[in-house]
Image: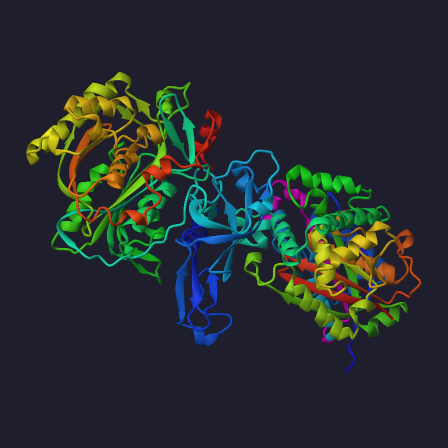
Amino acid sequence: MSSEPIERRVSYIGDRLKGSGCSLCGKEYFRIKDYCGTCGRKSFGKMKDIDFFYESGVLEVCTFVKQPTNKFVKLGSYIYGIVSFHNGKVRVPSRLTDCLWDDSEIDISSFEGREVVPRFRRRYTVEKTEVIPTISLTFTFADEYYPHQEYEIVKPRKEYETPGIVGYGVYVPRFRIKEPRMERAVPFIDEDAITAAVEAGKLALIHSGIDQTLIGKVYVGSESNPYAVKPIASKVAQVLRLGEEDKTEGLQSVDAVDTEFACKAATSMFKDATALVYYPGVHMSYAMVIGTDNSQAAPRNEIGGELDFFVGYGSSAFIFGKQDVIAEVEGWFSCTSDTPDFWRRDLQPYPRHGGRFTGEPAYFKHITKAAKKLMETLGLQIGDIDYFIPHQPNISFPVKVAKALGFKEDQYMLGLQVARFGNTYSGASPIGLAAVLDKAEPDERILLVGYGSGAGSDAYSLVTTSQIGEKRNRQKFNVEYQAENEHIEYVNYDTYRKLKLGL
Amino acid sequence: MPQLCPVIMGVGRTKFGEHYEKEPEKLIEEAWLKASVSAGIERKDLDAAYISDYFLQITNKIGIEEGFLSELTELHIPMEKTRSFSSALLNACNAIQAGKYDLVLVGGVEKMTDRWEKIRDDLMLLEDPWSYYAGGTPEANHELMLREYIKKHNISGENLEKLNIALAQISVKNHQHATLNAHAQFQREIKLDRVLAERKRVNRSLGLLDFAPISDGASAVVLASPKVAKQHTSALVCVAGSGSATDYITFPAREDRTSFIASRIAMQNALKIVDVQPNDIQIAELYDQSTLLEMISLEDLSFSKKGEAWRDVYTSCRDYQGSYMIDGRELFVNTNGGLKADGNPLGATGGAQVFEVVKQLQGEAGNRQVKTDRELRFGCIFELEGFGTKAYVHILRRD
């Protein structure tokens, strides 16, 4: 699509699968319609907005596309068909995603009649200079890796004095590559940092049960935004309809901004989100922080290729507020120095890495300082902390820093998730935090220490509340579910590079 | 008041296929000259012209087609552009019936091979943008329709096998017809096994040989009011009645995805105007963009019962004698080879259909002339724009 206005209009409808329903006769439409074809003029003003973003549908009929049109060629072969929503009230064209097909025979009828979930993805290939087209007319089977989950807004029942986390979500795809000591998450070819951010945000909303119109700010931290200039956060705000929506103008009443500081782009903003929802002058109920990365690494045989053994793909989203808090933010400490241990120059596709200088003068110095200083400020001993979650670029660094600080295995093992998903950069320590929150009991203390090359660390102390258990059943798609899923598909190195490069 | 039926005075066409060396203007010139010779008229006799092309604007960046035609004919008469030949013909008929013109040129041209690399994207985007955005291909909707058809009519086991063979037989039959058509893109026979093998190769229910090709070509018809026609000739084939209808652009959004409602309406309206029954039609040029569409059209145009066309095809083609046998009556379908073998240069396709039916009704189809004991009187041409988004039926009658 070479026209930005057309791209904006198609995305505005297609990303969210917006539709309309006639409140007189009940007829429903995909795409926004001001009147109903059956009821005619009397239905003017009586059409209600519906969208299918959180719905599940049924793949009614399908066919196997082996020779796509030019813009879809990079997707290879795929299943294409008709998906119906609301018992056939609405039917849309659809592409099944997250499938790698070999040349073996497939039985089309085995796919028909199955429940599918819309997935927000890149639409097709365009020139690198163009706006990236997205759409949610892409689906996966609900009985496979990604289940259908209702998004139900639940009225909050308790207001807390101290703000904290009210909901969170983690998204990693079903594709993995196996390394000697770890598994790494691999995006499907139509995924990128933008699509993962939207997925994680969606999952966080489902988990929190908050009204998304009450979110006043969304931060998206990433170092792999496919745009040099254009925020991911604006896409997240639009697709997830954060803040009040002005439908006539297509505007969301929300502040959306991208942040960048290598792997701490997201954790750095936890304190800002916490402070925002606490500010007495302006009432902002919730703020969302997303860390998303299609972690970049040069191919193994090139300079910077050493990262290619560790990088993952995924995203995490945390919602901060004062109502129905599951973990209060007790305090924080940050430190920074201008240490160039990892960088990527403008227009370069892959980052460079400071080799052995990424350890002592960078990762260890900053994490140790931040952790110690925060514990000192809050008067905490090692024994007061139930879970320690440092940034995790590989397996050895976090274990080494945990041991050096005096933590025992049962304090740091649950939060150590890098061996399952790889280094998800700005999503890395937040995924560890999510894994801990998935399991933690009330009144437990979590020490999270993010680290970003360049370099800096943010340490947070979080204390879980009595409400931590009650939201768990809303999120089936938790960290363990994604790590130990029977539908995970392993790919080889060549496929991994191809998928990671994207459309 | 009896219907005033515009008369087809002459027909002309180019060979369909790839015309690497020729501009679209050269193609339409060739078709128009042949039609004018066949009609025995001069260009200055023309009152107006209607020209159709589906997407010359995209394939050849030709913006104002009428200007090219004006320059070609060196005329300044009213000219209008439509998307399909059937649409141009309908507009010309309407104008003649309204008493506005007496002699009209109807032409169609398409130059698809000039945009070979991008044509499937263009075709799908124009057919339905949202299906394109979801990953649809020009072939996909045909296959989805077939799936819906099989499910709706509960076709399985041996019957499903027969249906699949029947569809392949359509392709085989149309290629067989085209061997006698010097204008056809593919003047060669194909074997049933190859049609089936092509499907197997791509793991799909319809394969390469189930679909009409990408083609270049042009066609033209000279249409006259009965008054003017009678001054030139006594053997008259007229457009006895026409029908057209529309449907949603998005195929998945349609209520019934096993037939085209637009085709049904167009046919019913045309039959009503001519006051005939479907079984009065003896020869039909159907829109076999795929083998499935020829089969579906047999039902949509009320030749076959719903859910039964594949049986009619299967039975007729077991020992093919040149026509389908439906309820004991002959129906000659796509005697020029259809879109599959004659070719499918979109804007010109309908003109080739008219060309064929006129030649057959006049008994001038040469070695293609259908063999029947009955006097040939009624033929019809059926054309679609998009995937059933627009449908046109013209019933031609020899008076």
Image height of A437 relative to B223, above or below:
above
Query: Which residue is farthest right?
Result: B373
Residue B104 within the segment the image draws in magenta: yes
Who is closer to the viewer here, A227 or B203?
Answer: B203
Q: Is residue B115 left or right of residue A209?
A: right
Residue A59 within the segment the image draws in magenta: no
Who is closer to the viewer here, A448 or A486?
Answer: A486
Give the image location of residue B80, x and y in percent.
Answer: 66, 63
Image height of A444 relative to B356, above or below:
above
**Rendered residue at 30%/53% (across/down):** A242
Who is closer to the viewer here, B207 or B380?
Answer: B207
Give the image location of residue B216, x and y in percent.
Answer: 72, 47
Give the image location of residue B337, x and y in percent.
Answer: 80, 50
Who is closer to the viewer here, B105 or B188?
Answer: B188
**Rendered residue at 72%/48% (across/down):** B161
Give the image location of residue B250, x and y in percent.
Answer: 56, 58
Image height of B222 relative to B145, above or below:
below
Q: Quadrant of residue A250?
A: bottom left
Q: Is residue B79 left or right of residue A307?
A: right
Query: Which residue is farthest bottom?
Result: B1
Q: Quadrant of residue B240?
A: bottom right
**Rendered residue at 74%/74% (across/down):** B272
Examine the rendering and report whether any part of residue B183 can be seen. Answer: no
Examine the rendering and report whether any part of residue B1 can be seen. Answer: yes
Q: Which residues are magenta?
A: B98-123
- Tell me which colouring the rendered structure shows: rainbow
